[in-house]
Amino acid sequence: MTTKQLCIDYLKALNEGNLADVRALFSDNAKVVSPLYGVLDAFDFYADLFKDTNRSETSLLNVFDTSEMSKSVALHFRYEWTLADGKLVSFECVDVFELNDARDRFEKLTIIYDTAPLRQDFDNLRRT
């Protein structure tokens, strides 16, 4: 599987809200660093994310994969996130992945985006 296909599979699983498919893309000990959720095991992060999500729609803008020898790849995409309470938030983000040695699973994900426009809606959702 190519790194680009791995990234496309990731966005597809995210759009479908398919917990098993998204988890299958990560190694067992993978971590996610999120501006809203903090640092979590990938398996726990996606369980929480999907619990807080009514619908996800991503639009891929760029894939940054500079070398087949690199252990990093970044996705730049627009995220249309409908929270569990029905509130729609939309933003551009960059997901920076660290890959395993075989480049067929994610070891770590660092998510980068401005949380200011959605922080209050997210905090309200998490309080209920």
Image (cartoon, rainbow, N blue to C red):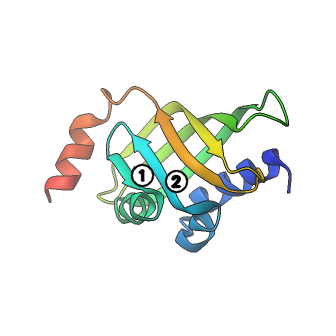
Which residue: 20% across, 45% down? 123
Residue 51: percent from the left, percent from the top?
36, 65
Depth check: 84 or 12 in front? 12
For the image, the number of numbered tags is 2
Q: Residue 82 carries which label?
A: 1
Residue 106, above or below 22: above
- Give the residue pinned by disc 2: 56
Q: In which quarter of the image is residue 122?
A: top left
Q: Residue at x 68, y 56 (%)?
A: 105
* Quadrant into which the N terminus falls: bottom right
Q: Name the residue rendered at 66%, 40% in the picture.
A: 59
**Does the CB distance between marks 2 and 1 fall below 8 Å?**
yes
Work out whether residue 63 or residue 100 is closer to the camera in this orientation and state it: 100
Q: Quadrant of the C terminus?
A: bottom left
User: For residue 117, which numbered disc appears in the image?
Assistant: none
Q: Which amino acid does label 2 sit on?
A: Ser
Q: Quadrant of residue 120?
A: top left
Give the image location of residue 23, x and y in percent.
56, 66
User: Along the line of sight, which residue is nearer the eye, 71 or 42?
Assistant: 71
Residue 91 horizontal side relative to residue 124, left or right: right
Residue beneath the point at 17% across and 48% down: 124
Q: Is mark 2 on a helix, strand or loop?
A: strand
- What type is the residue that disc 1 sits on? Thr
